[in-house]
Amino acid sequence: MKTPMMVELEGLDPARDLRAPGRADDPALQAILGTERSAVKIRRAPRPALVASAAAAAVVAVAVGVTLTSSLGSPPAYASWTPEPADLSRAAATQAAEPCGTSAHEITDGPDGPAVTEVPVRPVLTEVRGEYTYVVLAGDDAVTECFVTTPADGAQDVVTSDAVVAAGPAAPGARDVTTLQAGTASWSESSTGDGALTSAFGRAGAEVESIELTTDDGQVVRASLDDGWWAAWAPGASSLPPTADVTFTDGTTAQVEIDTGD
């Protein structure tokens, strides 16, 4: 039963004379069903083929994204890195190390749980490779590292390691090369925009002329030497070899082991 109000509202409906779609008495539906039908071919333009080597054919999913190779236009990690460090004056090295500060933060076990201890340090070696500055800082029986990225726009990104290691012997033997720390820098995997890097640093005697490390892809990475300290780094995880070639001031050479932490 319809009330007078419902009747009035029904009269205001502009679609009151239309049949519901799909009803058997719908003439539009009957006309469609009675039409002769034929298959329609759809042509799609062929997509350009991607030419890739067998090594590049594997696509590796990382977290929620996909790592693209540089052949698809992505810039390589640490694009401006060079296997040879830049020649720096003492003044330039001091200026380049300024963003790292003069203190390191060591996490120690305290009576109430882990505590952060501030350790005074100073730069003992600064090297620049491209737009990247790597600094070794040392204090009383403590050594740490710092990494500074200075892109073209000048917005510096400074990353310091929370790991502080013992400084080792204050005066290494004249032909000694010791490694205080080596391996994939844990802080680099999540803190730098270019991904992981492998670093190594230690002490070198007065008769050590050069230290070179050859990576798996054949690049010879020349370490920096400064007042009894040496350091080198290269892009990628575990990218430095376990041995280094050392040349002494008298022209003789030797191969020494570099503990890469693997």
Image (tube, rainbow, N blue to C red):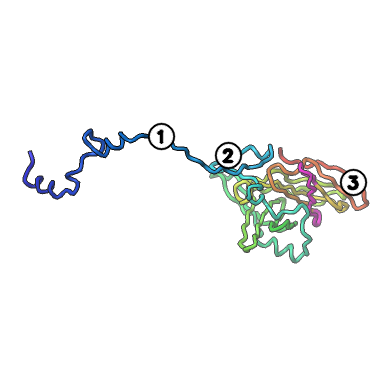
Query: Which of pointers 3 and 2 indicates the residue nearer the eye?
Result: 2
Residue at 66% of width from left, 42% of height from top?
A: 51
| Residue 5 spot, x, y in % from top left | 8, 47
| Residue 158 spot, x, y in % from top left | 63, 57
Residue at 84% of width from left, 51% of height from top?
A: 210
Question: Quarter of the image holding residue 146?
Answer: bottom right
Badge 3 marks a residue whose secondary structure is strand
User: Alpha carbon of mark 3 to alpha carbon of mark 1: how far?
Assistant: 83 Å
What span is in magenta? 213-228
Position of the C terminus by quadrant: top right
Residue at 78% of width from left, 42% of height from top?
A: 258
Q: Are marks 3 and 2 in contact (CB under 8 Å)?
A: no
Q: Are marks 3 and 1 in contact (CB under 8 Å)?
A: no
Q: Which residue is mark 2?
A: 61
Say if the magenta span includes residue 90. no
Q: Give the farthest residue toward the bottom.
A: 91
The tag earlier along the polypeptide, 2 or 1, is: 1
- As displayed, is residue 104 above or below residue 63? below
User: Alpha carbon of mark 3 to alpha carbon of mark 2: how far?
Assistant: 44 Å
User: Alpha carbon of mark 2 to alpha carbon of mark 1: how far?
Assistant: 44 Å
Q: Which residue is mark 3?
A: 253
Badge 2 marks a residue whose secondary structure is strand
Q: Is 254 left, or right, of 45 in this rendering?
A: right
Q: Amino acid at mark 2?
A: Ala
- Mark seen at residue 5: none
Q: Which residue is mark 1?
A: 38
Badge 1 marks a residue whose secondary structure is loop
Q: Amino acid at mark 3?
A: Thr
